[in-house]
Amino acid sequence: MSVVFHEESRTFSINTQNSTYQFKVGRYGHLLHLYYGRSMQESADFLIVPVDRGFSGNPYEAGVDKTYSLDSFPQELPTNGTGDYRSPAVIIENADGTEAVDFRYTGYSIEDGKYSLSGLPAVYTEGSENAQTLRIYMEDPFTHVKAELLYGVLPEIDIITRALIIRNGGEGKIYLEKVQGAVLDFVTGDYDLITFHGRHTMERVPDRTPVGHTNQSVCSRRGMSSHQYNPFVILADRSANEDAGDCWSMAFVYSGGFKAECEKDQYDQTRLQMGLMDEKFRYPLQSGQEFICPEVIMTYSAEGFARLSHNMHDCIRRHVCRGKFRDAVRPVLINSWEASYFNFTGELLFELAMQAKESGVEMLVMDDGWFSDRDDDRHALGDWFVNEHKLDGTLKHLVDRVNDIGLKFGIWIEPEGVNESSELYKEHPDWALVIPGRKPNRSRYQLILDFSRKEVVDCIYERISNVLRSANIEYVKWDFNRSIFDVYSATAREQGSVMYDYVLGLYDFLERMNRDFPNVMIEGCSGGGGRFDAGMLYYTPQIWCSDNTDAIDRLSIQYGTSFAYPISAVGSHVSVVPNEQNGRVTDISVRSAVAMAGSFGYEFSFTKIPQSDRDTINADIETYKRLAPLMMNGLYYRLSVPLKDAFTAWEMVARDGSEALVTAVTTEIHGNMPIRYVRMKGLETGRMYRDEASGREYPADVLMQIGWPIPAVLGEYHAYRLHLVRV
Ligand code: GLA
């Protein structure tokens, strides 16, 4: 059993293969967190030491006992107004205008299988796994506001999820002002917080900072998970590294604004929490209504970051991503964006497909520019009608031609965007999120449609599904090219609900697409990786990782991305040099090696590249197709740190150790360089491995203890790929 309740001590233990999570119902009904760490069977309640603390209040029931204080006790769901002065997970404005929330335990239930959340993405299992759900019920006896804490357990992969439902069981209307579903309190320890920050074209750069006596937070107030901070954080023991040490992570299964906080309190205790962004959020709940705070995926590793990532990858790959493409090797594609931007015709696209086909490309993606008068980024968003003049005929005609030469066909869409010059906007100006009386803030010349309104979602859905039905479209790239800041919905009664309801509208649209078009693979995108989160991955099994296609910048971007997300989720393409984002020149072999750590494709016109590159491309596509199953399913290891080490290397190892693919890209060159060794991981000790290309055999132990020497070659940026097969 994963979830165990000990009646006498009122202690709940959640057990996974390698971890235990424990909390108990305190004397007065508060939920006190006890432990999250290595597996153990006993009670850890001795960790809570009652001490009389000055300026730390006590609940009324404690009477003269000054040692019971929520200001110092570790908790499962800290709320505002109970005497805990650390950052709360829940703040509610009650019907009487007061703000105190004091949840007390009322009961629990344990069920087999993993819970799901209505209207929201959540980790799922397919029935055969030993997943369980624990629900804890709490209520504020004064206001009758109720809290349901949900815990999902996937024991085999050391995953525990948390979500929270708030119900207004009282009489009048209340407002939720802050809701965070996951809290972890650590009574002791020195930790680092690892966050993943970035910007457009440079996403998910890890940042490791010591947790001090302060409240650190990362958040997005952009209505999207954002390029700037990813909704994934790791709390790690100061000495934790890739291979050793305690670390815990939280990943938000949500694509809107979020907040993750980490605070070290007056008694050196650390609180980590994650949930919804509380700015621009004031969610009204009438009597009887409920609100679901999206899920957080947690995992614990006693063996450093590699293991933590493996748990996350397994969870996202098999229990977040869905549909027929989840486990499929994705087609190698050619995307028209960097090949021709808005300047294409049907004929030109067909040419692009023809040339790419010769190299083994399997799908043509027609990016932005195919609808209405969309010849630049100032027009037509919202008018989802095929520009048959530009395509030299109907979409079906073009798709059939491309299908006839053996390629699949995909298209780009941006359902949430609208240009003011569009017919849609002229007809429905109030469908855009614009503050009345003010001029809107534009971004990329566009506004955002109010997806909190069902009629808006319905209209755009109908337009886009008509296009999808009109031809054999097998792939859609779903883009989102700006952040949201003008938050006003013309029909919402209360504006504090709009940001959350917007995301529900987005998910409703995506769910309909998954339901109605199960054979269409959707790739997420938001100016590259601006909405790269576990919420989107529930609907789109891969996401365009970054608009930056430079191989060297991508080393850092893909490195950071890999902490939480598997490479099957990473869209990654080869583009031209000099690179269009930073002007850097790298060899085709380097661009190819880097792009292969993801769902592979190209972004250039094959006619514009030298013949020698063509030969490399042909061979690379062949290699990709052969090794893709290993890359999609193997265990991923980071073997170096980009920019810190002289090379960046990573490895995918088959779970049975039978083969491994190691890639290394050199990033530093000096005179008379020392030899650099790529130290491998996860091979089977005592065995020999043969490098397929050279035929040379290597002992696994030496490769893992010392490493493979990178050849001393002059010049910047070389890529090396070793496909090692166990002898
Ligand atoms: C975004 C995407 C690009 C491309 C353009 C089209 O920037 O990230 O890949 O699709 O939009 O406008």
Image: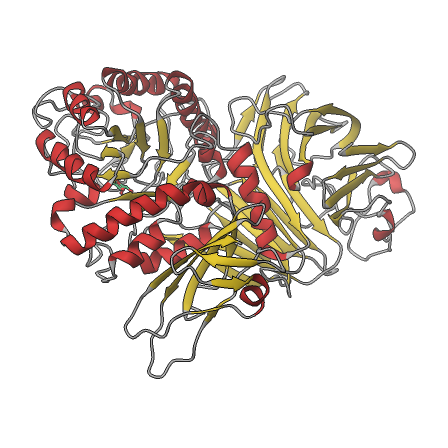
Horizontal and vertical percent position of residue 495: 44, 29
Q: Of 20 and 262, which appears nearest the observer?
A: 20
Q: Residue at x 29, y 23 (%)?
A: 430
Residue 612 percent location from the top left of the image: 17, 56
The answer to whether 66 is drawn above or below residue 664 in the figure is above
The x, y position of residue 289, in whole percent, is 60, 19
Give the quadrant of residue 267.
bottom right
The answer to whether residue 253 shows anywhere in this view is no
Between 599 and 433, the residue placed more toward the observer is 599
Circle count = 0
Q: Quadrant of residue 114?
A: top right
Seen at 55% across and 57% down, the residue is 194
677 left or right, relative to 311: left
Query: Looking at the image, what colour scheme do you see?
Result: secondary structure
Q: Residue furthest bottom?
A: 672
Q: State the quadrant of the N terminus.
A: top right
- Location of residue 9 in the rendering, given as x and y in whole percent from the top left corner: 90, 37
In this rendering, the answer to whether 160 lies above or below 461 is below
- Say if residue 167 shows up in the picture: yes
Side of 463 relative to 227 (left or right): left
Q: Taking the image as four quarters, which one is ligand 1 found in?
A: top left
- Compare residues 28 and 696 and report the one nearer the observer: 696
Figure check: 620 above or below 401? below
Say above or below: 381 vs 526.
above
Q: Is residue 74 left or right of residue 527?
A: right
Identify the residue at horizontal 42%, vertical 18% (top origin).
Answer: 515
